[in-house]
Each structure stands twice: as C-alpha cells, then as structure tokens.
C-alpha cells in the first residue's frame, strides 16, 4: 500500500512501524481476546500499557523523580484554563510571552481566571521571531508561560529563558520529544499528543510536585492537577487507545536512538527545506527570521498569490498532503514532525525545485 506524503500540522503522521504493530495487536492484545479499546482501564493488561507510557516518557526525557507525569484529555486548549486555575495565586500575576496565536489564546483564557499580562511580544513584527527576554520575571509573577514552537508562524525557541523567581510553564504541543530538553528548567510542561507523541485524544502534563500544593481544594475535581496526580491519571476512564499508541511511539523513539538521534534527523530534514528556500532568490520566501526558525514547521510563501495557489494545487496532484498554510496567514507550511521521514522531505524538496524551474 502506498503511504501518503503527509505534512499535516496535526493530527500528524505516525511512524509506520507503530501503525504496523498496532495493526498486528488490533483484535487481540496480548492474547486477551480483546482490542485495547475494549480493555477495562482497571485491568492488568491496561495497567501495563499505562505504566509503560509513564516509564518510557520519563526515561526518554530524563524527567526527574520530583515531577508528576499526567495523561489528561481536552488538548492544550483545556490546559490554557487548567494552568491558571491551578497555579495562579491571589495577588499575583501570570505573565505570558507572546509568540503567536496559541500564546494569545492561552493569555486570553488566563485573564478569565485572574490577573494575567504579556511579558514580551513579537506581534508587532508579525511573529517572525522569538522576542528576547533579558530580565527576570516581575516580583509578582505566579509563573511565566511560553509556547516553545509556533506551528502557524514557523518559529521556535532555540534556548529557554532563565526567569529565576517564577516557574516557567511551556506549551510544547508541537515540539515535545523532538529534541533533548532540560526538564528542570520548567515548573510545568504540557503537550497535546497529536504532533510527535501519538494520536489526538491524550494530553501529557509534566508538573513539578511542589507546584501541586497550589491547586485549591475548591477547584472542580476534574480540573485539579491534584486529582490526577493522586490517582495516577486514572481517576476516571482515560483515553486508553491514545495512551496505548503513545506508548508505541515512545518505544519507537527509543528504538532509533532516543532524543539525540531524533534531533539529528529533525535538523537534517529542516535544513533540506530551508536550503531550498534560501537558494531560490526570493521565489520561496520564508516567514520566520533565520535565528527563530522552527525545525517542526517550515512556513513560506511564493512570489505571488497566484504562484502560491499553483504550487499548492500541483503539490496536491503530486500526492503531498497538508501543505496549505494556516488559514490566518495563508501561504504554505510543511510540518516535519518525528514520523516524517528524510525520504519524504527529499521528495518535497525535489518537487519544490521542479516547480520553481517550470513555473
């Protein structure tokens, strides 16, 4: 069967090896006579899946013991609300670093909960770069929030700010597991799974245990991190199939050499496309400034709207999926998440060269 050349921004491609293993186990997981989605979340078979996902993620990301790993639902969008509900203390302010649409939405939701403000913003520059942070967070900061990779504008933090007196919270939905990071820099990390971790339906939260004390007992039960930490993310029925596929993705990442190997591959993929853009004499025009370019989402336009439209139409005819830019800015976007292969990126690069030559 021919696989699509899938450059979707999310839900995104999954590794073929993961899909093949899931297919093999689809009807009869571990001789249980049941598919994973039929298993009780209290069963021994599912407990093994759940514990494996936790263990593998901790090992791959080198998550210290003083952090909880939670498997939740609701996507990053629910975390826009849960983070301030659980971490924003009275008489303090949540500060947000604005790098695109998702940080704007996160700030908007935080303002519904309490005091929240922008610490720095790249909006005036059309979000072409990551703003520099040269000072510590204000004294009244409950936490500082950033979005590590910006899918719409194609920018990514190259290094993270050290804010000293406030926990750093990061939405890593689109670049978690794409490279090694120092988890100790963060008080809380959250990520929807549907880019690098697995399918949609599960959200990973990595939170330092001492921050759990901020969760007010008056919070709704399901919106408190304490609830999920105390119950190992099993207070209610978790998204069992999504967590199973997440665990298979983690096995696959480990099998190919872990995050150092993944980072090397991702850097190579991005370099292939950025070279095509940079060597095109303006025929392809990248959105992001070079120092802020994302390894995950390569965003660009062509010389004219007509050329951009023709490119997207011919790319679709050639079998490429998901190259349209986000509806808010248009243009083109190639998402290079972990499951996208170097061979597929080379196919796209070849198409881009041919299109430029013939247009």
Image: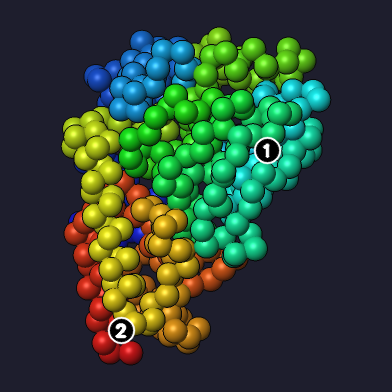
In the picture, which quadrant includes the N terminus? bottom left
| Horizontal side of residue 340 vs 80, given as left or right | left
Mark 2, secondary structure of its residue: helix
Dot 1 alpha-carbon crowd within 10 angstroms: few under 14, some 14 to 19, many 20 or more: many
Q: CA distance from mark 1 to mark 2?
A: 44 Å
Seen as rendered, the residue at the extreme bottom is 359
Residue 274, image quadrant: bottom left
Q: Which residue is mark 2?
A: 356
Q: Can I make out residue 86 in this image?
A: yes
| Horizontal side of residue 207 vs 332, given as left or right | right
Considering depth in this image, is 59 or 162 the residue closer to the camera?
162
Seen as rendered, the residue at the extreme front is 135
> What's the residue at 28%, 50% (across, down)?
266
In the picture, which quadrant includes the C terminus? bottom left
Q: Which residue is mark 1?
A: 95
Please, which colouring scheme is shown?
rainbow
Considering depth in this image, is 9 or 26 the residue closer to the camera?
9
Q: Nearer the viewer, mark 1 or mark 2?
A: 1
Position of residue 292 measured from the top left corner of the image (x, y, whole percent): 44, 56
Kindly check if marks 1 and 2 are in contact, taking CB atoms under 8 A apart as contact.
no
Q: Is residue 110 above or below residue 85?
A: below
Q: Is residue 120 above or below residue 31?
A: below
| Horizontal side of residue 178 vs 110, given as left or right | left
> What's the residue at 77%, 15% (across, down)?
218
Dot 2 alpha-carbon crowd within 10 angstroms: few under 14, some 14 to 19, many 20 or more: some
Position of residue 345 measured from the top left corner of the image (x, y, whole percent): 25, 62
Mark 1, secondary structure of its residue: strand
Q: Can I make out residue 113 in this image?
A: no
> What's the residue at 28%, 68% (across, down)?
275
Considering depth in this image, is 80 or 242 the residue closer to the camera?
80
Pick whichever of labels 1 and 2 is earlier in the sequence.
1
> What's the residue at 31%, 79% (across, down)?
280
């Amino acid at each position: 069967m021919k696989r699509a050349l899938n450059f979707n921004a999310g839900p995104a491609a999954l590794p073929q090896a993961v899909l093949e293993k899931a297919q093999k186990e689809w009807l009869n997981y571990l001789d249980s006579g049941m598919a994973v989605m039929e298993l009780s979340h209290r069963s021994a078979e599912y407990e093994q899946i759940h514990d494996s996902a936790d263990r593998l993620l901790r090992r791959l990301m080198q998550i210290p013991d003083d952090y909880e790993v939670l498997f939740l639902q609701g996507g990053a969008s629910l975390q826009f609300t849960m983070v301030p509900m659980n971490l924003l203390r009275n008489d303090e302010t949540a500060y947000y670093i604005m790098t695109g649409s998702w940080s704007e939405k996160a700030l908007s939701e935080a303002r519904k909960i309490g005091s929240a403000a922008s610490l720095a913003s790249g909006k005036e520059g059309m979000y072409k770069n990551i703003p520099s942070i040269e000072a510590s967070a204000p004294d009244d900061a409950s936490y500082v929030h950033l979005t590590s990779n910006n899918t719409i504008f194609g920018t990514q933090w190259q290094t993270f700010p050290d804010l000293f007196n406030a926990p750093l919270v990061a939405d890593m939905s689109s670049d978690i597991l794409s490279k090694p990071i120092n988890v100790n820099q963060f008080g809380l990390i959250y990520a929807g799974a549907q880019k690098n971790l697995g399918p949609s339906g599960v959200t990973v939260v990595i939170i330092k245990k001492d921050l759990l004390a901020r969760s007010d007992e008056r919070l709704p039960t399901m919106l408190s991190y304490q609830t999920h930490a105390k119950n190992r993310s099993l207070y209610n029925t978790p998204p069992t199939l999504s967590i199973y596929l997440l665990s298979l993705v983690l096995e696959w990442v480990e099998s190919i050499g872990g995050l150092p190997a993944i980072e090397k591959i991702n850097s190579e993929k991005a370099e292939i496309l950025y070279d095509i853009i940079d060597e095109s004499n303006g025929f392809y025009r990248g959105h992001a400034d070079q120092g802020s370019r994302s390894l995950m989402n390569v965003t660009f336009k062509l010389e004219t709207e007509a050329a951009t439209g023709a490119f997207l139409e011919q790319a679709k005819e050639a079998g490429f999926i998901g190259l349209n830019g986000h509806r808010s800015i248009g243009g083109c976007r190639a998402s290079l998440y972990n499951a996208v292969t170097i061979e597929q990126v080379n196919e796209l690069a070849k198409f881009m060269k041919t299109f430029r030559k013939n247009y």
